[in-house]
Amino acid sequence: MLAAYAATTSPDDPLSALVVGERPAPEVPEGWARVRVRAASLNHHDVWSLRGVGLPAERLPMILGCDAAGLDDEGREVVVHAVIGDPDYRGDETMDPKRSLLSERYQGTLADEVVVPRRNLVPKPAALSLEEAACLPTAWLTAYRMLFTQSGLQPGSTVLVQGAGGGVATALIALGAAAGYRVWATSRDEAKRAKAIELGAAAAFESGARLPERVDAVMETVGAATWGHSVKSLKQGGTVVISGATSGPNPAATELNRIFFLQLRVVGSTMGTKEELERLMRFCEQTGVRPLVDSVMPLEDARDGFAKMAAGDLVGKVVFTRP
Amino acid sequence: MLAAYAATTSPDDPLSALVVGERPAPEVPEGWARVRVRAASLNHHDVWSLRGVGLPAERLPMILGCDAAGLDDEGREVVVHAVIGDPDYRGDETMDPKRSLLSERYQGTLADEVVVPRRNLVPKPAALSLEEAACLPTAWLTAYRMLFTQSGLQPGSTVLVQGAGGGVATALIALGAAAGYRVWATSRDEAKRAKAIELGAAAAFESGARLPERVDAVMETVGAATWGHSVKSLKQGGTVVISGATSGPNPAATELNRIFFLQLRVVGSTMGTKEELERLMRFCEQTGVRPLVDSVMPLEDARDGFAKMAAGDLVGKVVFTRP
Amino acid sequence: MLAAYAATTSPDDPLSALVVGERPAPEVPEGWARVRVRAASLNHHDVWSLRGVGLPAERLPMILGCDAAGLDDEGREVVVHAVIGDPDYRGDETMDPKRSLLSERYQGTLADEVVVPRRNLVPKPAALSLEEAACLPTAWLTAYRMLFTQSGLQPGSTVLVQGAGGGVATALIALGAAAGYRVWATSRDEAKRAKAIELGAAAAFESGARLPERVDAVMETVGAATWGHSVKSLKQGGTVVISGATSGPNPAATELNRIFFLQLRVVGSTMGTKEELERLMRFCEQTGVRPLVDSVMPLEDARDGFAKMAAGDLVGKVVFTRP
Amino acid sequence: MLAAYAATTSPDDPLSALVVGERPAPEVPEGWARVRVRAASLNHHDVWSLRGVGLPAERLPMILGCDAAGLDDEGREVVVHAVIGDPDYRGDETMDPKRSLLSERYQGTLADEVVVPRRNLVPKPAALSLEEAACLPTAWLTAYRMLFTQSGLQPGSTVLVQGAGGGVATALIALGAAAGYRVWATSRDEAKRAKAIELGAAAAFESGARLPERVDAVMETVGAATWGHSVKSLKQGGTVVISGATSGPNPAATELNRIFFLQLRVVGSTMGTKEELERLMRFCEQTGVRPLVDSVMPLEDARDGFAKMAAGDLVGKVVFTRP
């Protein structure tokens, strides 16, 4: 079958490690299910895999891709939940120490077929297209969990999203606005601030700007560069939810004094559960909010999509399709 | 000043106890503030007061009304929070055992002026008119707390609202839909079911109908008549939030077995806090959802408004205005 | 191997359905583990099984018993967690709709050997004997979850335990006192009230008695007979946790008015998770609290133990041992 | 009346700023109450006040002391809650931005009499002596809130207390052990580690030591020096509760990557509410745990007590008494 896979890895020239070509169709283990992929979307994670981050040589070749929507063996339209857990684990699956994402240990979604544990299939709501649904299971799910599970926010609260240009940040703005939060966003880049307003932000500010008033929560994916601003922007009892630190994990000042005296909370978050994915899709259905799609192209042209992502030349998601 | 007040009370003929006429302007106690009322809305509570429920003779005459928006002494547009607490109490103010609602112990809002503790003033967001804002502090605040503080629901969840015609139920449907819940409503009355759909419900059912699937939470204001259906409609771990029992407090079957075996939760709720009122108004501003107004009339015509409410001849709120 | 099992069921004469005799040793499915049972304790559940409750004829013969401690194939001392879940389920395992207790679908613990999913084995803390550990996984675990997961209580709070004589109620009193709650208990029976004080209750009252002050939470296992007293004994915002209704599920008065006006919570609870079992054992280790054991006897004498339980002639647990 | 007060402040020689002498007896404002102090305990806060930290010149002279127990005007034994809030504030009083501690804006407890808002009086349980009760309202209350309100821990969990020698840390060890947690403590000092074991810790380790296994929560009052160890000691989903940073607020590495990937929580905490103080006293009553008292002396000898504290020559609290 056709697949986009890492044949090798290359820290400096990730695209050189990518092959778009034939791979054997997967076997279906007991308790697992096969999905004929119709749409699969690209994440930064896929480029990092080509660089070898989280993908040691002994697992190669590895089909890339975490996100997909397609048909199961009964012909039902399904979305693939990307977190593959340990069979012996119970509890919140994002806390499972042995979990992995598709394309880390198990072959990914950028292919004609993907196999996953049966429980990882979620019915696709009719209101979403396969292309739209294929954009949700990674960045949007991460944003859903940050905003709706971890933040403790209630509708009508004010939330600050740092670094408005990123994939998770974009999802945070769109989801927060659709849920009735007052969303403020920051970016160093004027075009990204304008985009944030388009996505539903009530206001957008220069990075580090003094805000009109303190906020109930901050969504952090930037890390060191924005940490001080995040902590100083919070009300008494406010919360920073953090799911990434693209500018580094160690800010110049942690501000522990401010954290304890104002009784702030810092809440780490990563990925999401299958139930959160189900609610995310239902939420999109009910509110009409949809993931922003930059471009749709056949899987044969996957190299073009990877090139766009590596160049940072994207507004929204790249979706690969199969007939 | 002009006021609509209970001169006496009458269990059988509440309108006979109503006077629309002159009352002395109130003094302003230390730490309190005066509001020049521009808009005040009517609640069932006001008719119950005329019947003598919660209003003993020694407190008469009592100006009616819990809800108001107007101008403070500095000319700022404010909304009045209706819960008057004990000065020595801290914590969630709806748990204060000595709290009362305006018009129970302190003179109410259907007048040229009302005085309340300074902390009970909330700035009105510019996006809401005074008439709209005056509809929020009682039924809508009750619905906000049920849905967003007490239910434990997350966006994308499914919620059942029993008895779609009531004032709180109407607010629950509109708020839930605007926040991205899938709202299902029930009513015995076809017109009310149609209205529920108009307000944003995803589906409306006959009272007691078998639902397409079990729900995450039920909002109860009906009580005995719908209790069994509410309990049986819930998923494992689901929640009934209850803030009223218009059909009586003692259902034929409490269903304790189902409650413990499915680990259900029953959560009582009443009124809301000032912070919840602030978020409710911000939520209306961000989402564009607005209270449904049946009619707006000058306070001089208050008797007509009370008559409409007593006759049950209302779709939405009656608002009284002052110039 | 030797086992105590239901050869048939008898609603009226449960002991006639019990056989203490030979059964084939179990196979060990993939992912499961064998435990050589050293101690197993008896629950009312076992007598109900003999009556046919939850045990249809097609599952017979069924070895009884939910609770056990023993040795795994590596010779480690382990305790058996009794909740057997669906392999595809994630989340809180007590919410798994397909879960069962040992001896409902899978052969139970009153035997030389029992097999369970590997994840159901919990290391036994050295401070507990095998006999003590074998008393914890059902009634004590239920009490742990009610008191420490579901109640929302904090140390120093006051909690009322209704029906002080029962197995779960006994555990509630001992655990609550050891955790620094002020525990009040009720019973119709003076000897049981005296026993409650011995177990650590700060005070014991006649059933339905007016209490010195309102309490933060009530633990309910009695149901209809005590419900009204439970609801009326709670403070504003208080919680009833319920895990059984031995006197029936439908009290004369549900008291919904009181529930919503005082913002009470009713929280259903059943069994507990493996992590709760681990914490329960650690808690026993740290505080020195131990389950009350009525008698220890070899499994060969199981009929005597069942007879004591059927006669209600017990203070604490009956433990069966194997060499 | 006799009082120990700051006549001036001195950053370098705090004892030189202390006067033990006559001050006028306080007036009792409307809604406030007078307490005849029988026992009052010393905190580091008092020495910091003498250094001028949080005590500007315009508030001098200021009677020192946050903690007291004594008699109200009706002769009842009461404990003084030290957090003085804004009358217009509702909600959790430790979140009140205008709150202060006794001796910051209002005259403190090291005197014959102190006046506080009526709501700040808490009845003393009979089981505690006045001297014991006077040790609870500051450091012990802080520890109570960290451990029982903020940590999310359940009985039987494992908690690490950093810096076992401090006043709050000592209270954390004693309270945690009494509540059935497995308490691990760290200190650089062997004597303090031995003391931790005496207070109930299950084990004590060198600062920074590799622990036998990861813990559910860490209690932080040390800050920069222990931060890295705290974060690395936590399980998936674990919590750091922080109420101080005596070694500085800015650790070399914040470890945001670890925080988000393991979904850790950092929870700031400061002081406690009146209801928490009530439960703390009840908890001491029920469990028998008592604050450690280093020495009891008449208020006339207050200078000796301050000298001991300034010299760090204390194990437990210094209590001043009045006849």
Image (cartoon, coloured by chain):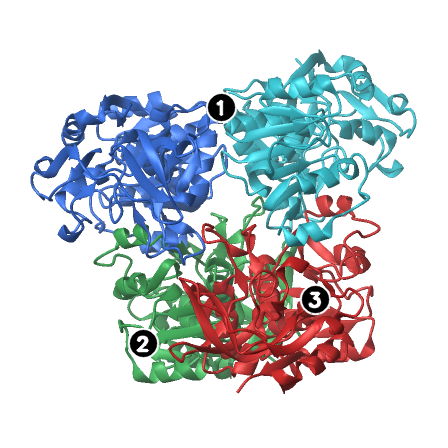
Chain colours: A red, B green, C blue, D cyan
The Cα atoms of the two marked residues, 1 and 3, are separated by 63 Å
Q: Specify few, some or many for label 2: CA neighbours under 10 Å numbering under 14, 14-19, or 20 or more.
A: many
The residue to which callout 1 is attached is D287
Q: Which residue occupies 71% across, 67% down?
A: A50
Amino acid identity at mark 1: Thr
Specify the subunit that label 2 lies on. B
Q: Horizontal and vertical percent for residue A25?
A: 51, 74
Marks 1 & 2 on one chain: no
3 or 2: mark nearer the eye:
3
Which element type, helix, strand or loop, lies under badge 1?
helix
Amino acid identity at mark 3: Thr
In the image, B181 versus A91, the foreground residue is: A91
| Location of residue A265 with respect to B120 vertically, above or below | above
The Cα atoms of the two marked residues, 3 and 2, are separated by 63 Å
Which element type, helix, strand or loop, lies under badge 2?
loop
Q: Which residue occupies 46% across, 42% down?
A: C275
Classify residue D279 as left or right of residue D272.
Answer: left
Q: Horizontal and vertical percent for residue C38?
A: 32, 27
| Location of residue B281 with respect to D5 vertically, above or below | below
Marks 3 & 2 on one chain: no
Q: Residue B187 shows which numbered tag?
A: 2
Residue B46 visible in the shown view: yes
Q: Horizontal and vertical percent for residue C172?
A: 36, 33
1 or 3: mark nearer the eye:
3
Amino acid identity at mark 2: Ser
Which element type, helix, strand or loop, lies under badge 3?
loop
Residue B25 visible in the shown view: no
Classify residue C106 as left or right of residue B303.
Answer: left
Q: Which residue occupies 66% across, 18% down?
A: D195
